[in-house]
Structure formats: C-alpha cells, structure tokens
Image: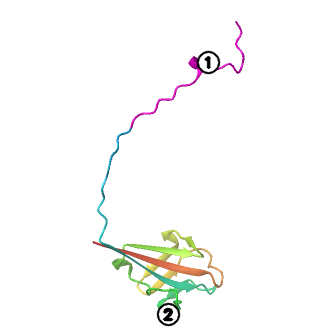
Amino acid sequence: MERKKHDITKESRPRLMLPEIGRVEKWFKLSQKVNVTQFCTQSDGKKRVYNNKDAVIDHSTSMILDPCYVSYINLFVNGVLQPATLYEVKRGVLILKSADVPAKHVPLILQFIKIEP
C-alpha cells in the first residue's frame, strides 16, 4: 500500500517531551547605596585631554573624580559606550587614547558609579 505525502498518522508525528522544572527561589542582598554621577563636556574637534574646567555645568553632576574612589567608570562618546582601552582617567583629567578625535560639538559623558556597602 502506497502512502500519500501528506498522510500524517498519530504514530508518524514527532513527540516532544519537556522536562518538569521545579521552582527555585534565590534571594540576593543588594548593596545599601549606589551613587551615580557624571561629568559632561563637548569635543572641540582638536584636543584629547579634558579637565574639570571643560565641564558643561548644566549637565554635569560632578567634576572628574579620582578612579581610586569609585567602583566603575564609563565613557560615552556621542552616546556610545567606549572600551576602557580608549581612555584614561585621573583626578581632574580625561585623556582620550583613540586614533581619531571626536568631531566638534560631540558630547562626551564620563559616568562614575560608586557602590557603597
């Protein structure tokens, strides 16, 4: 007896067996306080070194902090997170190490995250 192409019987259907997963609850203790501040400036299209005096005061919530006293530092150039290899931060100084300099008026946002116990 010849079988039709589209003739699907109960035995020919694939079986899908899903394992039962028990419910597991995990509790995590978060730190007491996370403090996030930022230093904002604009590129002039030429320089690689920025100081506290270059801050856009209306948008900055801090000056350039000492990396020893913060947990994390992120640099955003024109809204894009940059790898840590492309910049260096010292107290009061941001140094760009990239091959090219951001275009004039491009925003630079240096974010400081401090996690306190």
Q: Which residue is mark 2?
A: 53
First to last magenta residue range: 1-20
Q: Residue furthest front?
A: 10
Q: Is residue 81 left or right of residue 65?
A: right
Residue shown at 48% from the left, 70% from the top: 84
**Amino acid type at image mark 2:** Lys
Residue shown at 60% from the left, 76% from the top: 78
- Does label 1 or label 2 sit earlier along the sequence? 1
Across and down, in percent, residue 21 comes to 38, 39
**Amino acid type at image mark 1:** Thr
Across and down, in percent, residue 41 comes to 55, 86
Asked where in the image residue 73 lies, by quadrant, the reply is bottom left
Above or below 81: residue 22: above
Quadrant including the C terminus:
bottom left
- The crowding category of the residue bearing disc 2, from other C-alpha atoms within 10 Å (few below 14, some 14 to 19, many at least 20), is few
Q: Which residue is mark 1?
A: 9
Distance from the alpha carbon under mark 1 to that under mark 2: 78 Å
Q: Is residue 23 left or right of residue 85?
A: left
Quadrant including the N terminus:
top right
Q: Residue furthest top?
A: 1
Q: Tell me the number on the disc at residue 64.
A: none
- The crowding category of the residue bearing disc 1, from other C-alpha atoms within 10 Å (few below 14, some 14 to 19, many at least 20), is few
